[in-house]
Image: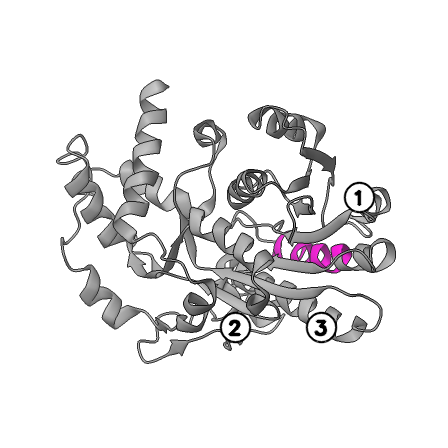
Amino acid sequence: MTTDTTVFVSGATGFIALHIVNDLLKAGYTVIGSGRSQEKNDGLLKKFNNNPKLSMEIVEDIAAPNAFDEVFKKHGKEIKIVLHTASPFHFETTNFEKDLLTPAVNGTQSILEAIKKYAADTVEKVIVTSSTAALVTPTDMNKEDLVITEESWNKDTWDSCQANAVAAYCGSKKFAEKTAWEFLKENKSSVKFTLSTINPGFVFGPQMFADSLKHGINTSSGIVSELIHSKVGGEFYNYCGPFIDVRDVSKAHLVAIEKPECTGQRLVLSEGLFCCQEIVDILNEEFPQLKGKIATGEPATGPSFLEKNSCKFDNSKTKKLLGFQFYNLKDCIVDTAAQMSEVQNEA
């Protein structure tokens, strides 16, 4: 891709998307982002010093019919790449269909329909930010003999994934991603874009802008924050699963744009498995100011816990396609926690 290429980033104010926008601008791309309000959009433009290569459009509700039509009516002839990062990620709901499943699916459907209507000849690549949640159900996550690869799919149905908020979120990622692949299959003759998906595990790492931490944080970062604020002798839930640093997620989006070999691929982003015990061990070892003040759990038992309580991920195909080294857990958590501590000390 030449650097005069225009990229549209949906949900540009999100945790991952802000890193992507930053990396795109650094690489010389022109970026059009969407956010939910004028206030959010103005805030983002200000953070990037009103960079002339960055502009923002309002998409109030990605679940609304024709949510992206106005954006593509206005800019369709200039947008070559679409990165669809917008999707609800929270567990604060009991109406799973309305708050998680439908918005994820409708948002994906409506952005692709808008491309078909207004940019069928101009958009060359679509990259959908999916998740490892699309690969495996929460109940299968703890099957120690299961190996998940780029070919795996979450087995939950629309009904079965509504058992609880976590299952519904995981289901929403599966059905949104399926929507994208099926749309392309059905509309091959009327659009020219290729499709890739990026499927990260739990995403840790520093915020692009530290002050984002003052306004509520993304779900994965919340895990680290809870452990930093745990009490000595306290218990914590030992979450486990695949992890990746947000900076690697962003970089993978750019590689997916630039490397033809990534076309048509599901790129599974995981540097390995983590559990909260390992994060607590890192916090106690690397931050003297926390040692003796936060939970310790059962130090050094992380690897044996993972051995018995987590399925395995084999994303060697993705690692080969992307061709760069991911951040390890220690560096990722140290950078995340250092930023959180700094912001807290300023408060």
Could you say where residue 197 lies in the image, as x and y percent from the top left?
Answer: 58, 63
Magenta stretch containing residue 3, yes or no?
no
Q: CA distance from mark 1 to mark 3?
A: 23 Å
Residue at (51% x, 45% y) in the render = 16
Helix, strand or loop for disc 3: helix
Magenta stretch containing residue 109, yes or no?
yes
Could you say where residue 3 lies in the image, as x and y percent from the top left?
Answer: 64, 45
Q: Which residues are magenta?
A: 96-111
Q: Amino acid at mark 1?
A: Val
Q: State whether residue 282 is above or below residue 300.
A: above
Q: Quadrant of the C terminus?
A: top left
In which quadrant of the rendered view does residue 284 lie? Answer: top left
Residue at (22% x, 47% y) in the render = 280
Q: How is the image coloured?
A: one colour
Q: Tell me the number on the disc at residue 154.
A: 2
Pick whichever of labels 2 and 3 is earlier in the sequence: 2
- Taking the view exactly as shown, the residue that stands out farthest to the top is 346
- Taking the view exactly as shown, the residue that stands out farthest to the front is 2
From the image, state whether disc 2 or disc 1 is nearer to you: 1
Q: Tell me the number on the disc at residue 182.
A: 3
Q: CA distance from mark 2 to mark 3?
A: 16 Å
Q: Residue at label 1? A: 71
Helix, strand or loop for disc 2: loop
* Residue 129 appearing in the image: no
Pick whichever of labels 1 and 3 is earlier in the sequence: 1
